[in-house]
Image (tube, rainbow, N blue to C red):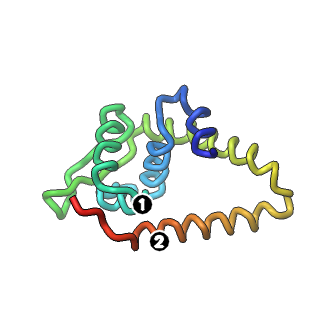
Amino acid sequence: GLNQAFRRRIAGTGATPDQFTALRCLTEADPKGITQGELTKLMSSDPNTIASLVERMEAAGWIERLPHEKDRRAYRIRVKPDGKRLYKQLRELAISLQASVLTVVPEREREAFLTQLAAVADACREAAEQAPKRKN
């Protein structure tokens, strides 16, 4: 439900929740950029999904791929100025939605709730990483 509410809030920006997550990961990462493989792990996704996501974001002018300084097969992905502006806008919408949704949790319990929710998210990420890989 939260993903659907967020998708509706950001619809006018042209971005998706996954693109927001990618922008967040890239913004919080090394300023030199990260590889597509690193982004895949950070987003707990699969390489094909991230490849498509990166292509669309690059075409939109939000990110750029630069040759990796050590690995000739890899690229470093960095956020461009338009991507930084978009991320700031999306983050404000996300914070507003979070504040709105959290009104159902008593204020004195919110910090503990968010801590527990983060622990659940970490456990989900770990479970996804430990799941057997699909055979092609």
Q: Earlier in the sequence, mark 1 or mark 2?
A: 1
Q: Quadrant of the C terminus?
A: bottom left
Question: Which label belongs to residue 62?
Answer: none
Mark 1 crowdedness (10 Å alpha carbons): few <14, some 14-19, many ≥20 = some
69 on left or right of 116: left
Q: How many marks?
A: 2
Give the residue at x 35% y 58%.
40
Question: What separation in Å lies between label 1 and label 2 (alpha carbons)?
Answer: 9 Å
Residue 107 placement (x, y as % from top left):
85, 57
Quadrant of the rendered image containing residue 25? bottom left
Give the residue at x 30% y 60%.
37
48 on left or right of 22: left
Give the residue at x 34% y 70%.
132
Q: Depth check: 106 or 26 in front?
A: 106
Residue 96 placement (x, y as % from top left):
70, 41
* Residue 79 to residue 39: above or below: above
Label 1: state its secondary structure.
loop
Pointer 1 residue: 44
Pointer 2 residue: 126
Mark 2 crowdedness (10 Å alpha carbons): few <14, some 14-19, many ≥20 = few
45 on left or right of 66: right
* Residue 72 to residue 6: above or below: below
Residue 7 placement (x, y as % from top left):
56, 37
Label 2: state its secondary structure.
helix
